[in-house]
Amino acid sequence: MTDSPPPLLLTSDDHFMREALRLARKAARQDEVPIGAVIVHQGRVIARSWNQVETLKDATAHAEMLALTQAESALGDWRLADCDLYVTKEPCPMCAGAIVHCRIRRVIFGCPDGKGGAAGGFWNLLQAPNLNHRCEITPGVLGDECVTVLKDFFAEARKRKLLGLAHTKGVAVLPEMSTDGPMFDGP
Ligand code: ZN
Protein backbone atom coordinates (compact mmCIF):
# COMPACT_ATOMS: atom_id res chain seq x y z
CA MET A 1 0.00 0.00 0.00
CA THR A 2 1.19 3.49 -0.77
CA ASP A 3 -0.16 6.97 -0.23
CA SER A 4 0.10 7.87 -3.93
CA PRO A 5 -3.07 9.11 -5.62
CA PRO A 6 -5.19 6.53 -7.39
CA PRO A 7 -4.46 6.15 -11.14
CA LEU A 8 -7.97 7.35 -11.91
CA LEU A 9 -6.86 10.91 -11.28
CA LEU A 10 -4.47 10.68 -14.20
CA THR A 11 -7.23 9.81 -16.59
CA SER A 12 -9.94 12.10 -15.33
CA ASP A 13 -12.04 14.29 -17.57
CA ASP A 14 -10.36 17.36 -16.09
CA HIS A 15 -6.94 16.06 -17.06
CA PHE A 16 -7.81 15.60 -20.73
CA MET A 17 -9.80 18.82 -20.88
CA ARG A 18 -6.71 20.65 -19.65
CA GLU A 19 -4.85 19.27 -22.64
CA ALA A 20 -7.64 20.50 -24.92
CA LEU A 21 -7.40 23.91 -23.25
CA ARG A 22 -3.68 23.99 -23.89
CA LEU A 23 -4.41 23.41 -27.57
CA ALA A 24 -7.11 26.10 -27.55
CA ARG A 25 -4.55 28.60 -26.25
CA LYS A 26 -2.21 27.51 -29.01
CA ALA A 27 -4.96 28.35 -31.51
CA ALA A 28 -5.33 31.81 -29.99
CA ARG A 29 -1.63 32.46 -30.45
CA GLN A 30 -2.13 31.65 -34.13
CA ASP A 31 -5.01 34.14 -34.39
CA GLU A 32 -7.54 31.33 -34.60
CA VAL A 33 -10.75 31.15 -32.58
CA PRO A 34 -9.42 29.22 -29.59
CA ILE A 35 -10.95 25.78 -29.55
CA GLY A 36 -8.93 22.65 -28.80
CA ALA A 37 -9.72 18.95 -28.95
CA VAL A 38 -8.15 15.66 -27.98
CA ILE A 39 -9.26 12.09 -28.55
CA VAL A 40 -8.52 9.44 -25.96
CA HIS A 41 -8.33 5.69 -26.58
CA GLN A 42 -7.82 3.32 -23.67
CA GLY A 43 -6.55 6.11 -21.47
CA ARG A 44 -4.07 7.40 -24.05
CA VAL A 45 -4.30 10.55 -26.16
CA ILE A 46 -4.20 9.52 -29.83
CA ALA A 47 -5.14 12.86 -31.41
CA ARG A 48 -4.56 16.50 -30.53
CA SER A 49 -5.81 19.38 -32.58
CA TRP A 50 -7.02 22.95 -32.55
CA ASN A 51 -9.14 25.12 -34.78
CA GLN A 52 -7.23 25.95 -37.98
CA VAL A 53 -9.88 27.46 -40.25
CA GLU A 54 -7.86 30.57 -41.03
CA THR A 55 -4.47 28.88 -41.23
CA LEU A 56 -5.65 26.21 -43.65
CA LYS A 57 -8.24 28.44 -45.37
CA ASP A 58 -10.68 25.61 -44.79
CA ALA A 59 -14.08 26.09 -43.17
CA THR A 60 -14.12 22.42 -42.20
CA ALA A 61 -10.84 22.64 -40.23
CA HIS A 62 -12.51 22.71 -36.82
CA ALA A 63 -10.56 21.17 -33.95
CA GLU A 64 -12.85 18.15 -33.77
CA MET A 65 -12.68 17.38 -37.51
CA LEU A 66 -8.89 17.47 -37.54
CA ALA A 67 -8.73 15.36 -34.39
CA LEU A 68 -11.06 12.73 -35.85
CA THR A 69 -8.86 12.34 -38.92
CA GLN A 70 -5.77 12.02 -36.72
CA ALA A 71 -7.44 9.39 -34.57
CA GLU A 72 -8.55 7.39 -37.62
CA SER A 73 -4.97 7.40 -38.85
CA ALA A 74 -3.63 6.41 -35.44
CA LEU A 75 -5.94 3.41 -35.17
CA GLY A 76 -6.04 2.55 -38.88
CA ASP A 77 -9.81 2.47 -38.74
CA TRP A 78 -12.63 4.96 -39.28
CA ARG A 79 -14.52 3.35 -36.43
CA LEU A 80 -13.59 5.15 -33.23
CA ALA A 81 -16.05 3.24 -31.08
CA ASP A 82 -13.80 2.98 -28.03
CA CYS A 83 -12.70 6.59 -28.19
CA ASP A 84 -13.73 9.65 -26.22
CA LEU A 85 -13.47 13.16 -27.65
CA TYR A 86 -12.72 16.15 -25.43
CA VAL A 87 -13.36 19.59 -26.85
CA THR A 88 -13.37 22.99 -25.18
CA LYS A 89 -16.64 24.14 -26.80
CA GLU A 90 -19.79 22.24 -27.63
CA PRO A 91 -19.47 20.79 -31.16
CA CYS A 92 -21.23 22.42 -34.12
CA PRO A 93 -23.56 20.41 -36.40
CA MET A 94 -20.77 19.62 -38.89
CA CYS A 95 -18.52 18.18 -36.21
CA ALA A 96 -21.37 16.40 -34.45
CA GLY A 97 -22.27 14.70 -37.73
CA ALA A 98 -18.69 13.55 -38.21
CA ILE A 99 -18.48 12.40 -34.59
CA VAL A 100 -21.55 10.20 -35.09
CA HIS A 101 -20.16 8.82 -38.36
CA CYS A 102 -16.96 7.83 -36.53
CA ARG A 103 -18.97 6.28 -33.70
CA ILE A 104 -17.19 8.10 -30.93
CA ARG A 105 -18.25 6.62 -27.58
CA ARG A 106 -18.41 9.77 -25.47
CA VAL A 107 -18.12 13.50 -26.10
CA ILE A 108 -16.91 15.69 -23.26
CA PHE A 109 -17.09 19.44 -23.77
CA GLY A 110 -16.31 22.57 -21.79
CA CYS A 111 -18.55 25.51 -22.53
CA PRO A 112 -22.02 25.14 -24.04
CA ASP A 113 -23.13 26.89 -27.22
CA GLY A 114 -26.82 27.64 -26.97
CA LYS A 115 -26.94 29.23 -30.43
CA GLY A 116 -25.18 26.64 -32.54
CA GLY A 117 -24.27 23.69 -30.37
CA ALA A 118 -25.23 20.24 -31.60
CA ALA A 119 -24.69 18.32 -28.38
CA GLY A 120 -27.87 19.52 -26.71
CA GLY A 121 -27.28 23.29 -26.81
CA PHE A 122 -29.53 23.97 -29.79
CA TRP A 123 -29.69 20.61 -31.48
CA ASN A 124 -28.73 17.19 -30.18
CA LEU A 125 -27.32 15.41 -33.19
CA LEU A 126 -25.11 13.28 -30.96
CA GLN A 127 -28.16 11.49 -29.62
CA ALA A 128 -30.60 11.70 -32.53
CA PRO A 129 -32.86 8.64 -32.37
CA ASN A 130 -32.97 8.26 -36.16
CA LEU A 131 -29.19 8.00 -36.60
CA ASN A 132 -27.40 4.68 -36.26
CA HIS A 133 -25.11 5.74 -33.43
CA ARG A 134 -25.53 7.81 -30.29
CA CYS A 135 -22.79 9.23 -28.08
CA GLU A 136 -22.72 9.74 -24.37
CA ILE A 137 -22.38 13.43 -23.55
CA THR A 138 -20.59 14.99 -20.59
CA PRO A 139 -21.04 18.78 -20.64
CA GLY A 140 -19.44 21.54 -18.60
CA VAL A 141 -16.02 20.05 -17.83
CA LEU A 142 -13.78 23.02 -16.89
CA GLY A 143 -16.52 25.10 -18.47
CA ASP A 144 -15.47 28.36 -16.85
CA GLU A 145 -11.91 28.08 -18.11
CA CYS A 146 -13.10 27.18 -21.60
CA VAL A 147 -15.40 30.23 -21.68
CA THR A 148 -12.62 32.48 -20.42
CA VAL A 149 -10.26 31.45 -23.21
CA LEU A 150 -12.87 32.41 -25.79
CA LYS A 151 -13.91 35.66 -24.13
CA ASP A 152 -10.32 36.78 -23.69
CA PHE A 153 -9.64 36.09 -27.35
CA PHE A 154 -12.60 38.12 -28.57
CA ALA A 155 -11.96 40.94 -26.11
CA GLU A 156 -8.39 41.20 -27.34
CA ALA A 157 -9.50 41.04 -30.96
CA ARG A 158 -11.96 43.90 -30.43
CA LYS A 159 -9.36 45.95 -28.65
CA ARG A 160 -6.94 45.53 -31.51
CA LYS A 161 -9.64 46.45 -33.98
CA LEU A 162 -10.60 49.56 -32.02
CA LEU A 163 -6.99 50.62 -31.81
CA GLY A 164 -6.59 50.13 -35.53
CA LEU A 165 -3.86 47.60 -35.05
CA ALA A 166 -3.22 44.61 -37.23
CA HIS A 167 -6.36 43.07 -38.58
CA THR A 168 -7.51 40.08 -36.60
CA LYS A 169 -9.16 37.41 -38.64
CA GLY A 170 -12.85 37.01 -38.22
CA VAL A 171 -13.41 40.03 -35.99
CA ALA A 172 -15.68 41.76 -38.46
CA VAL A 173 -18.24 38.98 -38.25
CA LEU A 174 -18.25 38.59 -34.49
CA PRO A 175 -21.53 39.42 -32.77
CA GLU A 176 -21.59 41.52 -29.67
CA MET A 177 -20.83 39.37 -26.69
CA SER A 178 -22.37 39.86 -23.30
CA THR A 179 -20.61 38.69 -20.20
CA ASP A 180 -23.02 35.85 -19.64
CA GLY A 181 -24.72 35.22 -22.97
CA PRO A 182 -23.83 32.95 -25.87
CA MET A 183 -20.22 33.29 -26.82
CA PHE A 184 -20.14 33.60 -30.56
CA ASP A 185 -21.38 32.16 -33.80
CA GLY A 186 -18.63 29.72 -34.47
CA PRO A 187 -16.78 27.75 -35.45
ZN1 ZN B 1 -17.35 22.21 -35.57
Image: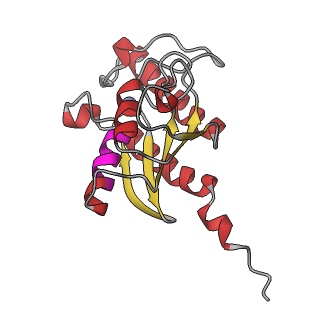
Quadrant where the C terminus sits is top left
Above or below, 103 against 60 in this view is: below
6 left or right, relative to 113: right
Residue extending farthest left: 57
6 left or right, relative to 47: right
Q: Residue at x 46, y 11 (%)?
A: 175
From the image, give the main secondary structure of the stretch colored magenta: helix
The number of callouts visible is: 0
- Please tell me which residue lies in front, 92 or 34: 92
- Please tell me which residue lies in front, 90 or 55: 90
Q: Residue at x 49, y 37 (%)?
A: 134
Q: Residue at x 35, y 13 (%)?
A: 172
Magenta segment, which residues? 63-71
Q: Quadrant of residue 30?
A: top left
> Magenta segment: does it hold 69?
yes
Q: Quadrant of residue 103?
A: top left
Quadrant where the N terminus sits is bottom right
Q: Taking the image as drawn, is residue 187 in sight? A: no
Q: Position of residue 12 (x, y in %)?
A: 63, 58
Above or below, 154 against 80 in this view is: above
Q: Position of residue 28 (x, y in %)?
A: 41, 38
